Amino acid sequence: MKIGESLGLIRERFSSAGIEEAPLEAELLMRHVLKLDAVAFLNNLGRELPSEQERLIDSLAACRLSGKPLAYITGKREFYGLEFVINPSVLIPRPETEHLVEKTLEIASRMRSPAIADIGTGSGAIAISLALNLPQAWIYATDISPEALELARLNARQHKVESRITFLLGDLTAPLPEPVDMLIANLPYVKSLDCATSPEPHLALDGGVEGLDVIERLCGSLHGKLKAGGWVLLEIGQGQEERVKRLLSAALPFAQIGTIKDLAGIERVVWGRIDDIII
Ligand SMILES: C[S@@+](CC[C@H](N)C(=O)[O-])C[C@H]1O[C@@H](n2cnc3c(N)ncnc32)[C@H](O)[C@@H]1O
């Protein structure tokens, strides 16, 4: 069988199973096995597929069809144009989180040498994207999961920014050694019932009955963690903006509060900026 024919078959199997991005996932799975980049893959569609690789593609496709996310099969995922090593101890970084990175870059690039905290860093996708795009920044990356922090450290080493990020194990803002200019977080915000059967770690998804337990605790832990003029940016789920704005206003009474929509028009980030008053 030719590589192109095998691609067609995998695509069809993925589409029939209802996999949302079937064509892309089929291509990524095949490129992973064949060790080809996008251009080389296209150039090789007419080549014969060796039977050993055909068998491997088949078994990985079956694994995907059984419900395992592609990133856990290939062990990698692209985020903000960068490749990250991924394993089942971390959330698979989502494209919508790139809004959080964009907005942080926009604000931080106007600061001279900002200290930025990424709370609940997971694979390190946010912290590392910021470190690579803000050479003047100092980054703290925290997580309550030792396995996630280990993977984030590995990703930082691979992207050569390990020396610019301090990795801290602990609950929310507790491990931060000093107030920061910007505090960024994509914490769990899914309702417990909605993530009960997810293959991703519950520690990364489960925000309690209403989805906001962890964000509420984060807001309650902001006291003394921000410098004057400091910013907080929180990723949220659909329909959570009013409740999170209230939580943030209660935690930062003198702050300006706003929201940012994602490409689908969903309010995705709630931000707060304190003025000159140190909380
Ligand atoms: C939704 S995932 C986000 C991971 C990563 N920031 C990203 O955007 O891909 C949430 C992360 O928060 C961590 N987390 C959950 N509860 C925490 C807590 N109380 N303190 C610190 N981190 C926590 C989880 O281990 C997980 O890595």
Image (cartoon, grey):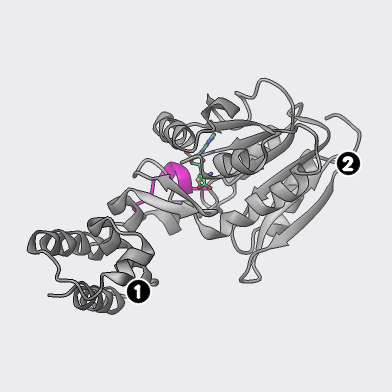
Quarter of image, res 15: bottom left
Magenta stretch: residue 45 in it? no
Q: Secondary structure at mark 1?
A: helix
Q: Residue at x 64, y 24 (%)?
A: 176
Name the kind of residue labelled 2 in the image. Phe
Q: Residue at x 35, y 74 (%)?
A: 23
Q: Which quadrant would the C terminus be assigned to in this image?
A: top right
Mark closer to the observer (1, 2)? 1
In the rendered structure, which segment of residues is drawn in magenta?
199-208
Return the disc, 1 or 2, that comes first in the chain's sequence: 1
The answer to whether the residue bearing label 1 lies less than 8 angstroms from the nearest atom of ligand 1 is no
Q: Secondary structure at mark 2?
A: loop
Q: Position of residue 267 (x, y in %)?
A: 67, 63
Asked whether the viewer can see residue 242, the reply is yes
Q: Residue at x 23, y 57 (%)?
A: 33
Q: Position of residue 262 (x, y in %)?
A: 64, 64
The residue beneath circle 1 is 23
The residue beneath circle 2 is 254
Asked whether the viewer can see residue 249, the reply is no
Residue 165 or residue 194, whichever sits in front = 165
